[in-house]
Amino acid sequence: MYQTTDMVKIFRITTHHDFKNQGVATALIEALKQLNKSIILELREDNFKAFQLYQRFGFEQISKQEKYYLNREDAKIMQFVTAN
């Protein structure tokens, strides 16, 4: 995670398979939103489950980065903007 005075950039969110579907990612996102800063993150274009999770928390896709990952997969760039 990288943080400035008004923005947080998330580099990786992952949940160990033993803890999936137990609200861990939800709790983390809620905690990040409490920082009252804009949040930017990338996710693989085919990661529909994560995309839906972020949308549920108010993230919007703001762009697409072609060949972002080492295996040349594209990434969706998403952002959450605070109400402040």
Image (cartoon, rainbow, N blue to C red):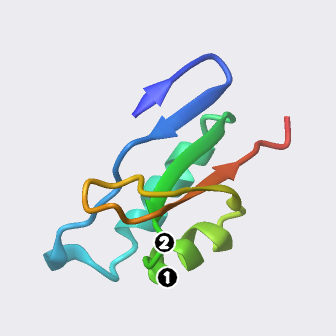
Residue 48 circle label: 1
Judging depth in this view, the residue of 67 and 56 nearest the camera is: 67
Please name the amino acid that badge 1 sits on.
Phe
Which residue is located at x 22 percent, y 74 percent?
Answer: 19
Residue 35 sits in which quadrant?
top right
Distance in Å between CA atoms under marks 1 and 2: 8 Å
Amino acid on which the number 2 mark rests in the picture: Glu
Give the residue at mark 2: 45
Q: Is residue 78 left or right of residue 82?
A: left
Give the residue at the far right of this rendering: 84
**Residue plotted at (69% across, 50% down):** 80
Q: Residues within 10 Å of mark 1 (few under 14, many from 20)?
A: few
Location of residue 82 in the rendering, given as x and y in whole percent from the top left corner:
77, 42
How many discs mark residues in the rendered view?
Answer: 2
Furthest-left residue in this view: 18
Q: Quadrant of the C terminus?
A: top right
Residue 68 or residue 25, whichever sits in front = 68
Which numbered marker is on residue 21?
none
Picture coordinates of residue 51 (x, y %)? Answer: 55, 73
